[in-house]
Every structure is written in C-alpha cells, then in structure tokens.
Amino acid sequence: MSTLHTVNKSPFQDNSLASCLQLCSVGDSVLLIEDGAYGASQSSPCAKELISLLNEGTRIYVLENDVRARGLQLLLDGIELTDYQGFVQLSSTHRCIQSWY
C-alpha cells in the first residue's frame, strides 16, 4: 500500500521536502501544504528531484489555496493543484500518512 507524504515547510528554509523525496516509494504521493507550496515552484531547490519522481509516476499535489496565498505562479509541470476536499480524498486512499514538519 502507499503513503501520502505531507510537507509544510519551505524547501528554501528547511530540508523536510528533500528528506521526504529521498524516502518516497513507488505508489506514494506527495502533498505540499502551507509553506511547503514553495516546493512546487520552478525555482524550488528540489525541482530536479520532483521532476524525477514525476517522471517515475509519483503523483505530487499542492493545495491551491496555499499557492494563491503565497502568490506562486510558475509551478513545475506535472504537479497537480488540489483543494481541501482533494486532501481528504488523498488521505482516505492511502494506507498511511507521513507528515514532514
């Protein structure tokens, strides 16, 4: 079964996203929330790792409200916007949730 990884820290100030990406397995998903939304930007320090995981089939999401609240516009291709209802659905379709704080 799969894990939903939630990351709420900016990759510009914390290594939570980098650590998370190293431990993702096939079938896992990543959800960027709060300041973690900065990880979805094209200038993210983890952009190469995110693109690699996307190419391997890992699904990566970012909360749309957090993107808007931070004024982010240039997101990496393949990252999916979701809302709170989508967050709930992701939570219920994964075996476990790992929060990276």
Image: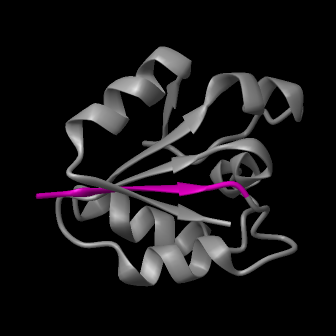
Where, by quadrant of the figure, is residue 100 drawn?
bottom right
What x and y, as percent, mark residue 77?
Answer: 50, 43
The verdict on residue 81 being magenta is no
44 lies above or below 34: below
Q: In the figure, is residue 74 to the left or right of 50?
A: right
Q: Which quadrant of the figure contains the N terminus?
A: bottom left
87 lies above or below 47: above
Residue farthest to the left, as pictured = 1
- Marks counted in the figure total 0
| Extent of the magenta region | 1-8
Q: In the figure, is residue 17 to the left or right of 90?
A: right
Residue found 87% across the figure and 27% down from its top: 69
Q: What colouring does the structure picture have? A: one colour
Q: In the figure, is residue 56 to the left or right of 48?
A: left
Residue found 66% across the figure and 43% down from its top: 33
Q: Which of 55 and 94 is in front in this view?
A: 94
What x and y, as percent, mark residue 10?
Answer: 79, 62
**Looking at the image, can residue 9 be seen?**
yes
92 lies above or below 23: above
Q: Which of 79 and 66 is in front in this view?
A: 66
Residue found 27% across the figure and 33% down from its top: 92
Magenta span main SS: strand
What x and y, as percent, mark residue 94?
Answer: 24, 46
68 lies above or below 16: above
What x and y, as percent, mark residue 41?
Answer: 71, 50
**Looking at the image, can residue 83 be seen?**
no
Where, by quadrant of the figure, is residue 28 drawn?
bottom left
Q: Which quadrant of the figure contains the C terminus?
A: bottom right
Residue found 35% across the figure and 57% down from its top: 54
The verdict on residue 7 being magenta is yes
